[in-house]
Image (spheres, grey):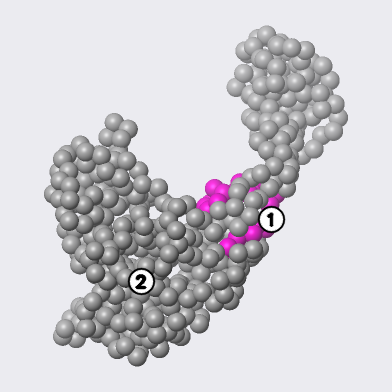
Amino acid sequence: MVKQTLVTDCGSEPGLISIDTAMALLSTSVTPLAVERIPVAQACQRTLASDTFAAVDLPAFSQSAVDGYALRINGSAPAGSRFTLSGEIRAGQVVDRVLQPQHAVRIFTGGKIPPGTTTVARQEIVQRVSSSGIELLAALEPHRDIRDAGEECRKGSLLAQAGQYLNAGAIAALAMAGVSQVAVYRLPRVALLITGDEVSSRGQAADSVDDGKIHDANGPLLSAWFQQHGIACERFYVEDCMDTVAQTLAQLKANYDLVISTGGVSVGDYDFIRAAAKTSGFEQVFWKVDQKPGKPLFFARCIANETVGKDTGSNEQNNCYLLGLPGNPAAVYVTMQVYGKILLNALQGVSHLPQWFPARLQAPIKADKRERLLRMVYTFVNGEIVVSNPGNQQSHMLGNLFQTNCLVRIPADESLSAGMRVFCQITNLFQAY
């Protein structure tokens, strides 16, 4: 664990911090947001704030696992055994009468087995011999195809722990266990601040963008990134003016939990984010990371009350965090995939860092003086992840994002041969091939 220490002198090249240090500082410098209780049906893409327990047994009653016949036999039954048919049980129907020896009841998947049942014969091994009789076509053991009450979990047993991310499957599991509401962390209020006089913010057609202007990629990129994470955000554009940037940050700080800015974090004459952040009440945590792309990464915070949230997880005193990204769109994409995820996790009470998986290089890679985060393509070869470089890795290029589905860490000052081991982070688990 990296000690949470504010880095105040990262401006020179010797002061660059490592990727691992930056990730740890992000994870440990954030207070989780407030907790709220919401219906399970509305909790997809949220994070549990407390342990959650089953409200009922699963299954709630002993039931048939197949369409077939509930039987009462003494031990096993050989092929050719006959039974008297005495009724039918559909799913959702309750029959309380006790099943008698050598009797059978027609039953369907999910149907509650009647008292006295010792086994269930699936319909594929049964033939009707009369209107009220059946015969087994194969031998049958006791207790076949019965789902016992509580075999998955008992009422009051732990279903999911705090920090669990709720996807569609988790929602289904909670609902089936009778959980109607869950305690989750509030979603962050997010503002996107796009800087740069050269950026056209009007979504103009290609032939109508003013001379010297460029189409905005960062705003749509970040909006889509948060949309993928189930979070709404608002977008703001600001001119390269110190006073304007400072005033805008001060306003955003008062109304949002998280501000993501693009551009204005380097050392140019018109890079005002750091100075404006200080003026508007933010405290720098770190600036500049020994990585490529995204070296001038900036993270600052404005803590309204250091004690808020330590006992309750509440952040209602309007703490605000500022993640200042470079202006080049590929750097924006890469830094959000790594650091944006960590920041969101921390706001949702999750302190562990994303996992990096071992992989093999398909082709050699030349050395660079900084550690690189390359957009690459992973495939599985003989049960192992193999990563390949599609090229066009410059920080102003985005074309390879049509193919790439992972980020790969390439150590500084090392030339890597084909087949050497590297570490990757999966960025697209649902990409079609």
* Residue sitting at the far right: 97
Residue 422: image quadrant is: top left
Q: Nearer the viewer, residue 6 or 400?
A: 6
With 157 as the anchor, is 412 left or right in this view?
Answer: left
The residues colored magenta run 164-186
Residue 173 is a magenta residue: yes
Amino acid of disc 2: Thr
Which numbered circle lies on residue 180?
1
Residue 273 is a magenta residue: no
Amino acid of disc 1: Ser
296 is higher (above) or lower (below) than 377:
below
Find disc 2 in the rendering and name its residue: 8
- Give the alpha-carbon distance from disc 2 to disc 1, as whole Å: 47 Å
Number of on-image labels: 2
- Label 1 neighbourhood size at 10 Å, few (<14), some (14-19), many (20+)? few
Residue 17: image quadrant is: bottom left
Is there any visible trace of residue 279 in the rendered image? yes
